[in-house]
Image (cartoon, rainbow, N blue to C red):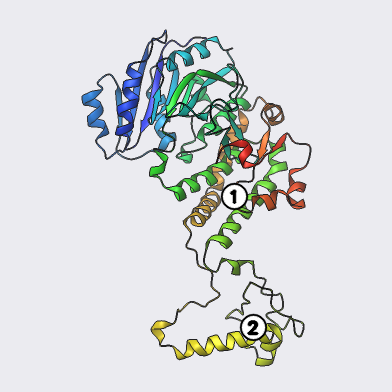
């Protein structure tokens, strides 16, 4: 069914320089065959966006927020304010081709009634490489833009009308009623994976998403998200990925895959802590492997490269016990180090023991923050899951027969984990899963 009117929704945070390209391109759109309006949310910008829009683009309906609401809440606010019965979501750092909106409208008008949204194609700023045509979902809630940054000549671009698990939030046309009925974007996400979450909710609710490759926009990839910083983006990726699978998996898939999801989240966090922080290797040390309570066999050497630790709360240990527990080499090394530290002036001695691990890596901190956020919001996540599952009209097995879940080594240590017998046991061998290398999914 053809929409009566379309609202183009653009959220912008300190993106005036991007709007200087985006808004003129919207003004120059070919006639889509229906009336359309342009709504812009100035999301707490400090670069004079609102004043510039009022002066240079009076045709744009401007909505101002004094603070940055995030991509999700910002778009939800625009959808609520929209006059159209279909809303085109567009990133501010894009340049839509002249026929972009008409292609989206035509695709939605030609689609069956169960189609809630259509997704356009996104290319890089030169128009030579792919940004988004279709995405794939990993078993733990992350997602990839398939063939991201590959030349268009070799990228896998689906034919028009192909089913997609989700539309890209930076180039999609969605029926306003369907968007609202599904709950819109989850505002707790702030940004990232909100479109994956929405697409899954549309599908489980009995609706579908189709591809409209003629609706092309050029994108300055990461131009806005770079303002957040890598670590802050990592926090959003990890938290939102877990929430996506926790809320949306049906009971069968959640029971089957949650152990593998938690194992992966724990393994990635632990690997970052060990590899990226001073003294991180101490976290792999087992204090009961012959180093306290006289548990060592005589002449047993400590395992290299980990330095043994005697907790300060342990009972006093005699020299003979230390000799047997540490072994001669480690005993002498520690004795020499202690003598040197004793001889140095107090200001020259690090008050921390030499075997202490220190958390200094911002990526590790982001990972731990994500885990902390998840643990402190379990009740709200559970309530959201109940609401999502109450709308279910299609089981996950049917969805993932169409769109298999991916297992892609992405983080340090993933290849070892995913190849382990323990991980394979949790995943099973009867689920619709695709194992792929990172290079098979997208260009580095």
Residue plotted at (35% across, 21% down)? 25
Residue 174 located left or right of residue 163: left
Label 1 close to label 2 by CB (< 8 Å): no
Which of the two labelled residues, at mark 1 and mark 2, occupies the earlier sequence position? 2
Residue 299 position by quadrant: bottom right
Q: CA distance from mark 1 to mark 2?
A: 34 Å
Could you say where residue 198 lies in the image, as x and y percent from the top left? 54, 30
Count all numbered tags in the image, as a single digit: 2
Q: Nearer the viewer, residue 326 or 60?
A: 326
Looking at this rendering, what residue extends furthest in the top direction? 33
Residue 202 located left or right of residue 102: right
Could you say where residue 411 lies in the image, as x and y percent from the top left? 59, 49
Residue 84 located left or right of residue 53: right
Q: Which mark is residue 248?
A: none
- How crowded pointer 2 is (Cα within 10 Å; few <14, some 14-19, many 20+) is rated as some
Residue under numbered circle 2: 330
Give the SS element for disc 2.
Answer: helix
Could you say where residue 389 lies in the image, as x and y percent from the top left? 62, 32
Where, quadrant-wise, is the C terminus in this rendering? top right
Residue 311 position by quadrant: bottom right
Q: Nearer the viewer, residue 1 or 389?
A: 1
Give the SS element for disc 1.
Answer: loop
Could you say where residue 342 lies in the image, as x and y percent from the top left? 48, 89
Residue under numbered circle 1: 411
Q: Nearer the viewer, residue 241 or 97?
A: 97
Residue plotted at (42% across, 7% down)? 33
């Amino acid at each position: 069914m053809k929409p009566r009117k379309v609202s183009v929704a653009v959220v912008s945070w300190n993106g005036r320089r991007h709007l200087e390209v985006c808004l003129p391109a919207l003004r120059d759109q070919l006639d889509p065959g229906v009336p359309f309006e342009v709504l812009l949310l100035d999301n707490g910008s400090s670069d004079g966006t609102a004043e510039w829009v009022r002066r240079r683009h009076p045709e744009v309906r401007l909505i101002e927020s004094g603070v940055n609401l995030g991509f999700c809440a910002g778009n939800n606010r625009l959808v609520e304010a929209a006059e159209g019965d279909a809303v085109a979501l567009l990133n501010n750092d894009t340049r839509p081709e002249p026929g972009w909106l008409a292609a989206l409208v035509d695709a939605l008008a030609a689609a069956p009634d169960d189609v809630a949204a259509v997704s356009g194609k996104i290319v890089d700023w030169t128009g030579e490489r792919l940004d988004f045509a279709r995405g794939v979902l990993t078993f733990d809630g992350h997602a990839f833009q398939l063939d991201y940054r590959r030349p268009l000549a070799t990228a896998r671009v689906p034919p028009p009308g192909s089913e997609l698990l989700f539309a890209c939030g930076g180039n999609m046309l969605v029926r306003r009623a369907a968007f609202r009925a599904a709950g819109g974007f989850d505002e707790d996400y702030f940004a990232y994976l909100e479109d994956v979450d929405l697409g899954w909710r549309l599908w489980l609710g009995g609706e579908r998403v189709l591809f409209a490759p003629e609706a092309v926009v050029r994108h300055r990839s990461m131009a806005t998200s770079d303002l957040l910083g890598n670590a802050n983006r990592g926090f959003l990726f990890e938290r939102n990925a877990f929430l996506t699978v926790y809320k949306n998996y049906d009971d069968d898939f959640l029971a089957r895959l949650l152990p593998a999801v938690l194992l992966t989240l724990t393994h990635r966090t632990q690997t970052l802590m060990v590899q990226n922080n001073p003294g991180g290797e101490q976290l792999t040390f087992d204090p009961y492997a012959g180093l306290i309570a006289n548990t060592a066999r005589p002449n047993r050497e400590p395992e290299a490269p980990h330095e043994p630790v005697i907790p300060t709360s342990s009972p006093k240990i005699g020299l003979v016990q230390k000799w047997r527990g540490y072994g001669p080499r480690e005993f002498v090394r520690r004795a020499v180090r202690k003598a040197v530290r004793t001889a140095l002036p107090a200001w020259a001695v690090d008050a921390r023991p030499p075997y202490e691990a220190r958390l200094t890596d911002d990526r590790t901190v982001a990972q731990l923050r994500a885990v902390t956020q998840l643990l402190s919001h379990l009740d709200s996540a559970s309530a959201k899951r109940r609401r999502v599952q109450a709308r279910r009209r299609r089981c996950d097995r049917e969805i993932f027969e169409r769109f298999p879940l991916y297992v892609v080594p992405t983080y340090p240590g993933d290849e070892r984990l995913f190849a382990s017998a323990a991980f394979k046991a949790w995943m099973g061998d009867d689920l619709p899963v695709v194992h792929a290398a990172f290079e098979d999914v997208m260009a580095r």
